[in-house]
Image: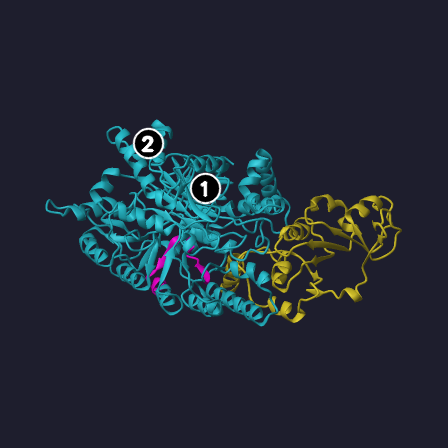
Chain colours: A cyan, B yellow
Amino acid sequence: MYHYNDFDRQFVHARAAQFRDQLERNLAGSLSDDEFRPLRLQNGWYVQRHAPMLRVAVPYGALSSKQLRALAAIAREYDRGYGHFTTRQNLQYNWIPLVKSADVMDALAAVDMHGIQTSGNCIRNITSDALAGVAADEIVDPRPYCEILRQWSTLHPEFAFLPRKFKIAVSGAVEDRAAIAWHDIGLQLLKNAAGEVGFKVLVGGGMGRTPIIGTVIADFLPWNQILVFIEAIVRVYNRYGRRDNAYKARIKILVKAEGQKFIDAVHAEFKNILERDEQGAAHIVPQAELDRVAAHFVTPAAVQPQAPIALLNADASQAYRRWIARNVHAHRVSGYRSVTLSLKRTGQAPGDATDTQMELAADLADRFSQGELRVSHDQNLVLPWVRESDLAELFLAAKAASFATPNIGLLTDMIACPGGDFCALANARSIPIAETLTERYEDLDELYDIGDIDLHISGCINSCGHHHSGHIGILGVDKDGKEWYQVSLGGSDGSTLSGASVPGKVIGPSFAADEVADVIEAVVQTYRAQRAAGERFIDTVRRIGLEPFKAPANAVRTSTGAASHVATTAAAATA
Amino acid sequence: MKFIDTHQDAWHQVIGEDGPKPDPDPRPHLLLSLEQWHAVRDHWPAGLATGVIVPNDADIETLEQDLPRLSLIVLQFPKWIDGRAYSQARLLRSRYRYAGEVRAVGDVLVDMLQLLQRTGFDAVVLRHDQSVNAAQRALGFFPAHYQGDTQDNRPWFLKSAEQAAAQVQ
């Protein structure tokens, strides 16, 4: 993991002091609420339905056990004893009073953490593959590059007030586990024929009201030019991105509107920086700097290759077999595995963890994973350094701590935003939908028979729950002050299993809250009836299209069964 | 950073009853709109202290040839959360080596000061309700930053590596 040096530490403490000054001016009345808002947002403080929400940055999802314990202590001392891990690998609190916010920033700074740029119209926390540095299919470890990007983007003076938020995701493996094509900038690390490292650069992806897949703007950019190239992209965006309409302000709209002109403008700006600007090449990253940062990400000394062992004995229980099959992943070091701690179980919202659970996860990390954890973009925790010979013991410990639901990649491993229960932006609640579905699919035999499904729920069109990229997407919409849900099928996050990134398509007029679980069941039953042998859900949807799913879905309508409702919401859905 | 008191300011715009005068007469310390400047630039006397106020959606590139004749460029923040003028200032300093005054006007808040300073502004007209003391405090929170800026475009890692090398010698 990256370890802060004196400069990094001084910097987050300075940021906490700056925030305290802003908070005090706000409380004293010399900084208005309206003007405090963008400042607190850039430190992760939203004002939500019940209280402010704090989004703590977990850079590229990497956490130490010490940091997780500090997060647990904050949950206990300042919140109501829990937190929520997000699709952007961050952690959110929901109940901290704003007057305590500066104290919490100090508590975070004490363990080298902060909320810098977790919100606001700036370059957000950089996300990456939860298996970075340990994945068996890794081409280049993305973490040093993520850290270099993190430092460069932190309090960048020119790019603090962009037209809209700006998200960067980095993948360094064959399999894209970071959904890079759905980001404002997606970076894929590659090696060319000569073995040199570079980035494929995508720009202009995004979800929200207008889902768009990123466009390739550079096929192979030498790694050391990445900061300058991103500076060029963000400068063109800062100057020419739309600011008249928040729904059209993301870079995706600029890229789509301008097409090749945008790409040419970025390349021209890149050239101008290097050839014309005062010290224009200063951000070409020297090998020595990459080496300095990469030294933080070496394999822990205690991790030594082991002879691989058989993971399953003949007498292994079905529960253990399922856990090995679903929650345990291939590792680049022989004799090691990475293990997902599932945060998807009955009784708790997807991605939620109590203070006690956070401490239990920290204990597991200390016992089994070199004190290190990852937050995955599908809202689970990952232990990256587990010895194969420890798996049986870890299974029992994880089970006792509620983390061993063997459902990774299955229907109940769903992504869900906090929705209308917490979020002031939401049109509808996500958590009760997730809860109903989790309860309905508790039977593991059934869940395993259904197989791989990405089910994603967003409480509004802002798409924090990534409904566009779900094989099944559920989107909360508001009509006449009531909660309705649109269901879409066939979306992809860009993984091998899901196929090329694409938004799902809506199957019809929206459904009432109490119909949603029945609709999902009807969709799933249609798949089970229609699938070819061994065919996964997403492949069946691709093969037979949406049409066969529509009649069974409509058949479960009760409150929306009236023809008049179908007609009006159909109009709304196509509007 | 220079804090401008508008009552003491030497610079004046030339505005008639129907808005900016299209073709003002030469005088020192006139702050001209971009349109006015374009109308007079071909016959404007050399050596006259002249300023131009530039909208934040104007391509700053178009002023490149004129910069040696201008002592002041005023950049605008119609809303403080509209960050386009930071890029304009950055280009003026880093790309065109503009050495005159770059001034921020409009919705200029104390919490912008650090960003303004680091993108090349050297003068501000704070919004009327803003405190100069708080603005000066806002400039002092951070001893240094990660990325370079118009004052020194070397990022922190280059500066610290060079310092370390110097100590070894």
Q: Is residue A510 above or below residue A303?
A: above
Q: Label 2, on which residue?
A: A539
Nearer-N-terminus badge (2/1):
1
Check disc 1 and report its element: helix, strand or loop: helix
Q: Position of residue A326 (x, y in %)?
A: 25, 45
Which amino acid type is shown beneath numbered disc 2? Asp
Q: Chain of mark 2?
A: A
Q: Which residues are magenta?
A: A51-69
Residue pictured at 28% horizontal, 29% vertical: A530
Q: Have a look at marks 2 and 1 and say if they share a chain.
A: yes
Q: What's the mark number on residue A342?
A: none
Residue A445, quarter of picture: top left
Q: Is residue A319 visible?
A: yes
Nearest to the eye among marks 2 and 1: give it: 2
The quadrant the N terminus of chain A occupies is bottom left
Amino acid beneath label 1: Trp
The spot of residue B94 in percent (x, y) is 65, 51
Q: Nearer the viewer, residue B10 or A201?
A: B10
Residue A280 place in picture, x, y as percent: 60, 49
